[in-house]
Image (tube, rainbow, N blue to C red):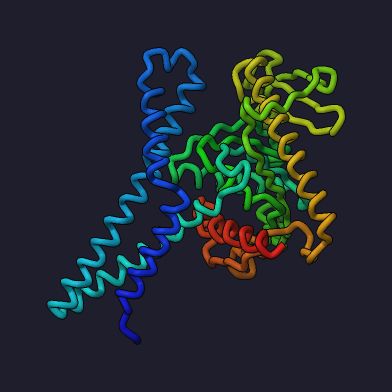
Amino acid sequence: MAATDFASEISALRSTLGTIRAVTDPEALRTRIAELSDQASSPDLWDDTDAAQKVTSALSHAQSDLERIETFEQRIEDLETLVEMATEEDDAETLADAEKELAVLRKDLGGLEVRTLLSGEYDQREAVVTIRAGAGGVDAADFAQMLLRMYLRWAERHGYPTAVLDTSYAEEAGLKSATFEIKVPYAFGNLSVEAGTHRLVRISPFDNQGRRQTSFAAVEVIPLIEQTDSVEIPENEIKVDVFRSSGPGGQSVNTTDSAVRMTHIPTGIVVSMQNEKSQIQNRAAALRVLQSRLLLQRQAEEAASKKAMAGDVKASWGDQMRSYVLQPYQMVKDLRTEHEVNNPSAVFDGEIDDFIEAGIRWRRGAGTQS
């Protein structure tokens, strides 16, 4: 086994960090932190709770971004010192420690580098994710619930706040659909690569003959609307229905007609909200998600127009983007990036960072080729 060329590896790490610094601009981050700190120290900050939470959240993430870059600089210097000491003393054990730290640094720096690829118009936004059961009956509904847990666990692992906005339970088990928010900057940029059709292959726990079943679920990811986006929807284009919220098995969770179903008449887009405490809150949440979907639709129409002018470069195998196979073998494979792992249990427990990173890199590569 060839000895590691630490000088070359450390030089490559510094080059990658230099690229990250050029994109993230630490000086601009310091200026941003100073501005947000001034806003956060305002005595009337919490007069508007929503605005205050946005300021404090933005400040926290800006500080984390700056600290992350500065920490990497120190970690690279520490690695270089460790290698020098081990080489001078011909210490094999310390060199082995340096090898391990080099591997960890490569992985961590690669994750930070991915952030620099999130430069789309809405990538910095918070995200609204909707999961819908597809073909496959009760197995598909159960799969939809598995995916919901997977994404909520992913957010929990990172300390990202979430809010489930709507859940529609299937009759036997699982979910017909669920909508939730991930309230952190860059949530849309990261999770947008998760949008598409997901496929599950397993021995159905709902089949008394123990047959293998293939089921599908669709994942939709949209950026959360902001007031500055100005997606105006005339009142006469919206139909609003109210009904009582309900949980699994029809159990009432509300004794008033607080749930809201909002239909955008021109496009037929329907948004349901039932998890807030009042009709007013559900109506506001539904409008926000409807505006977000219309904003994304506008963007998609513009992209389709550009694609039509450029021509269809390549075909794809339907909309399916990832397979989760539990039987006859264990594997999760992304069909776009070819990234795969042999531990579906870990994936369903929220370990999807490598899939997200591979998806972001794949998207950037596909974009530069088109």
Residue ranking furthest to the left: 89
On the question of residue 136 being in view, the answer is yes
Q: Which residue is located at x 68 percent, y 13 percent? A: 256
Where 27 falls versus 108 (above or below)?
Answer: above
Where 255 falls versus 98 (above or below)?
Answer: above
Say which quarter of the image contains residue 28. top left
Q: Which residue is located at x 84 percent, y 33 percent? A: 268
Where 150 falls versus 83 (above or below)?
Answer: above
On the question of residue 174 being in view, the answer is no
Residue ranking furthest to the right: 266
- Residue 153 percent across, percent down from the top left: 50, 45
- Residue 160 percent across, percent down from the top left: 47, 39
Q: Is residue 18 left or right of residue 279?
A: left
- Residue 250 percent across, percent down from the top left: 70, 27
Frontmost residue, 207 versus 265: 265
- Residue 46 percent across, percent down from the top left: 43, 16
Say which quarter of the image contains residue 55. top left
Q: Which residue is located at x 31 percent, y 51 percent? A: 71
